[in-house]
Amino acid sequence: MIVSTKETAKSTPCGAATFAGKQVHMVGIGGAGMSGLAELLSRHEALVSGSDCLNSSATERLKNLGIQICLGHRAGHVPEKTTTLVVSAAIRPDNPEVLEAKRRNLQILKYAQMLGACMKGLRTAAIAGTHGKSTTTALIAYILRCAGVDPTFVVGATAEQLGGSSAVGNSDVFVVEACEYDRSFLNLSPKIGVILNIEEDHLDCYKDLGQIEEAFHSFASLVPADGTLVAKEEDRSIKRATEGVEAPVVTFGLSKRSTWQGTNLTSKLGRFNFDVLHEGHRYGTFELRIGGIHNVYNALAAICVCHQLGVTAEQMAKALLSFSGAQRRLSFKASLSGITVMDDYAHHPTEVQVTLKAARDMVQPKRIWCVFEPHQHSRTRFLLKDFAASFGSADFVVVPDIYFVRDSEAERASISSRDLVNHIQANGGQAVYLPKFGQIVRYLKNKLEPGDLVITMGAGQVWEIADEIVHWLGSDS
């Protein structure tokens, strides 16, 4: 059960309490992180309002909490008594609500700046990395809850077992997802810092991998000498990023060099059982309900963090076995008429590759139909060759138009989904470009057979296709 009473919120020594009674307006409130932060502020009695381009399950949940949400962006949406305007990373400086806040000399904070302000006074575990942040953050929060530690948390995705993407706990522990985009994680103050992995991404705001490593080094340097930095052992970029930091570094991985080593791995339908050694000594045996080797690494990081926070191996083992994952992370939608439908948030080549491999191991389908919606024209252009090579586990790839966000019109004109399809085909894959979701649904209806798996992927709205296919299968059965 989520702790959400006013009494608990008041007793938690959280920086969010400093906004009690103040009007906070949030632009882009429907995003996973923003909606979680809005909920956190609201539970600490801030007067929260917001706006977004689209209605969503997140905005509906916030409305049910009494938060006023406007559709679209207009100067008139900023309430008269607003003292602070919070903007998501996707909001441009010329947004009319931002311009209105500037005209009225209101305090304007980025999402990460407000998040950093809210975590003051708490023992914070901040989970960073190119991949796996949401799952690992949600997993840590879930383990803590199961162990009787009631954390405050903000996750960049909804987790049904946590009741949403955020909650106000009655302990002094704050678990938060730390995003590297726009170097936003440098606004945080972690006592425990986690780096899951480092790869090229967000090349619209970083020049190259070297700059990304520098940003992660700055993040690692935020962890104080009496804190702990948790880092993946088998990652050269992490080794460079953590060199010379003040905090003690403990590592996780499958290598014998790891402080926390996963060993004796076995799997059944893609779900792993493994032993953990701590500094070479047996710590415990763990089994995962969620699939994929990448989630073994996420679990090892979570085990390390929760050990630092006083959770026993037995408590962790029980929680890991029951954790069902975060929303849109290898999410099972339905299995009807012999056809399985899944959905995932993967929008980077490495994520696509490991997710497809895990999905094949878990479902063992006759054929995989992957509907991949590229996210950002700049990401697609920068990582085009890697994307084209990442669909090896799929039998067919269907690609709609690129989800347009944050990029300039010039960037939009520089590349299209047709370019990605051409590269997939050049790599020997079977791929087709169908610009609109309706076209894809009609196409799949004519192609799908019993034994097939359909998996939708992307950070945009591609999940709508999965829902349409489930609806069609349900009405046809």
Image (cartoon, grey):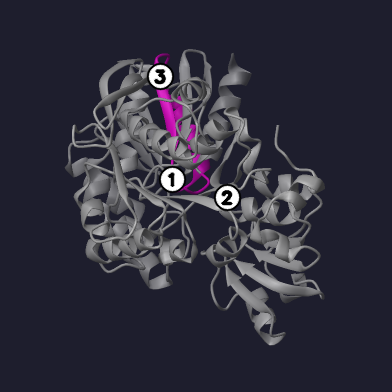
Provide the secondary structure element on which disc 1 rests: helix
Q: What distance separates the C-alpha of mark 3 from that of mark 1?
A: 20 Å
Q: What distance separates the C-alpha of mark 2 from that of mark 1?
A: 13 Å
Check the image and name the residue furthest to the front.
Answer: 226
Q: Image quadrant of residue 330? A: top left
Residue matched to label 1 = 133
- Disc 2 packing (10 Å; few <14; some 14–19; many ≥20): many
Provide the secondary structure element on which disc 2 rests: helix
User: Which quadrant: the C terminus?
Assistant: top right
- For the question of whether residue 328 can be seen, the reply is no
Vertical comparison of 65 with 362: above or below: below
Can you give x and y, in whole percent of width and height, for residue 90 in the image? Answer: 52, 64
The numbered disc on residue 222 is none
Q: In the visual, does 158 lie left or right of 423?
A: right
Residue matched to label 3 = 287
Can you give x and y, in whole percent of width and height, for residue 41 in the image? Answer: 70, 57
